[in-house]
Amino acid sequence: VGPNDDDTKLMLQSIGMSSLDELVKSTVPSNILSSKPLNLAPALSESEALSKIKSMADKNKVMKSYIGMGYYDTIVPNVILRNMLENPGWYTSYTPYQAEIAQGRLEMLLNFQTLCSDLTGLPMSVSSLLDESTAAAEAMQMCFSLKGKKNKKNKFFVSQDVHPQTISLIQTRAEVIGIEVIVGDHSSSEVDSGEYCGAIVQYPNTYGSVSSPGESYADFTKRAHEGNAMVICATDLMALTKLAP
């Protein structure tokens, strides 16, 4: 809504200014202050602005996405959208200050943690706010902290079928902390050699296949564990509703 003319005049008087132009000239350095008026279209009302935005959006063409690499279209049932993702009860039940409203967020995160545990079959999960690539790099660093040693057992295997954006970020992080990243075919990897602190595979992989050709992920994981290495599996929670964890 903004202040009216009387409010504006009162605020200017309180700081010793006669106009908004004088206020701007006193605060913005002259070498970056433009003397030309802005070339802007006339102001629109809220309804007019919404109508114009909609007409612009209607020009978009909705195409099918074949990019792969983890970017998949999903259909979320309206009952889940309304009762989970768009449920105002997560925040309107609480008074609007940080400590209190955070309870609603924590409840939602707890639901997400429970969902992750149920779909992955793992006894513990965390409510990460990281993107997949960063989470993979953090997981690699955890493997190195638990199993690796500086200049010894500092290798980390990355399946060539992991998303390329994930591989790139893992390589960037590894270079800084002294981890040697080996990218290749998981079937011919030497993760059981005792030189690796960990490995990562993608399920489904970056090409959309349930798993990569060759050795099964179960057998690969068994070999890695024999070499005292940890195994990370980057997966899609929606896929795990149909696939075995």
Image (cartoon, rainbow, N blue to C red):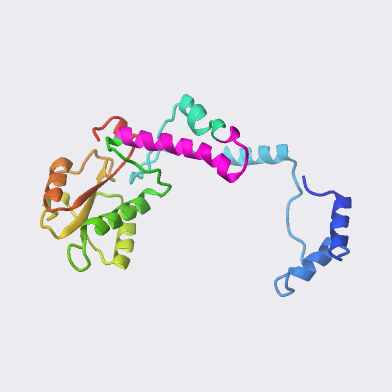
Identity of the residue drawn at 41% across and 36% down: 112
- Front-most of residues 218 and 36: 218
Q: x and y percent of residue 189 in the render?
A: 13, 54
84 relative position to 11: left or right: left
**Residue 73 appears in the figure:** no
- In which quadrant is the N terminus drawn? top right
Residue 47 figure quarter: top right
Residue 185 in view: yes
Q: Position of residue 222 (x, y in %)?
A: 13, 45
Question: What residue lies at 32% left-to-right and 32% top-to-bottom?
Answer: 118
Q: Is residue 242 magenta?
A: no
Q: Position of residue 235 (x, y in %)?
A: 30, 42
Above/below status of 169 relative to 88: below
Per the rendered image, the range of residues in magenta is 91-119
Extreme-bottom residue of the structure: 31
Judge left or right: residue 211 versus residue 165.
left
Residue 109 on the magenta segment: yes
